[in-house]
Amino acid sequence: MRKLKLIWDFRGPASKKTAEHHLIHLKEYITINSLNLEITGIETYNDMHSIAYLVVDESEMKPLRDALKPHRGQVYSEN
């Protein structure tokens, strides 16, 4: 089954801290809704751009996308 990476972009000098904070809320959502999702995290591209992300099975994407409103998504690869 294909996995998709739901992504929230944060820009500006506080982007890393904002992404870290958003990740806390994503993990809370997973716990509250008893979801079996294990791959989450943040990535920092530079001082002005960081992301928070959540990886889901393609079959589970639509309700999560509608509830969490990510900025974008992409096919997930473990590389």
Image (spheres, rainbow, N blue to C red):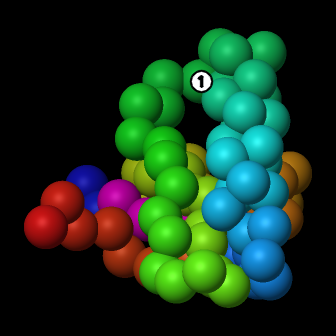
* Left or right: 58 as drawn, with respect to 49: left
Against 41, residue 74 (above or below) is below
Task: Judge whether 77 appears above or below 73 on screen.
Answer: above
Residue shown at the point (22%, 68%) measured from the top left: 77
Q: Residue at x 77, y 43 (%)?
A: 21
Looking at the rendered image, the quarter that the C terminus falls into is bottom left
Picture quadrant where residue 39 is located? top left
Query: What's under tag 1, amino acid-wise?
Result: Leu
- Where residue 1 appears, as percent x and y from the top left, is 25, 55
> Could you say where residue 78 lies in the image, as x and y percent from the top left?
18, 60
Q: Is residue 10 magenta?
A: no
Residue shown at 33%/68% (left/top)?
A: 76
How many marks overall? 1
Secondary structure at badge 1 equals loop
| Depicted 62 relative to depicted 31: above or below | below
- State which region is magenta: 3-7
Q: Is residue 56 visible?
A: no
* Visible residue check, residue 34: yes
User: Label 1: which residue?
Assistant: 35
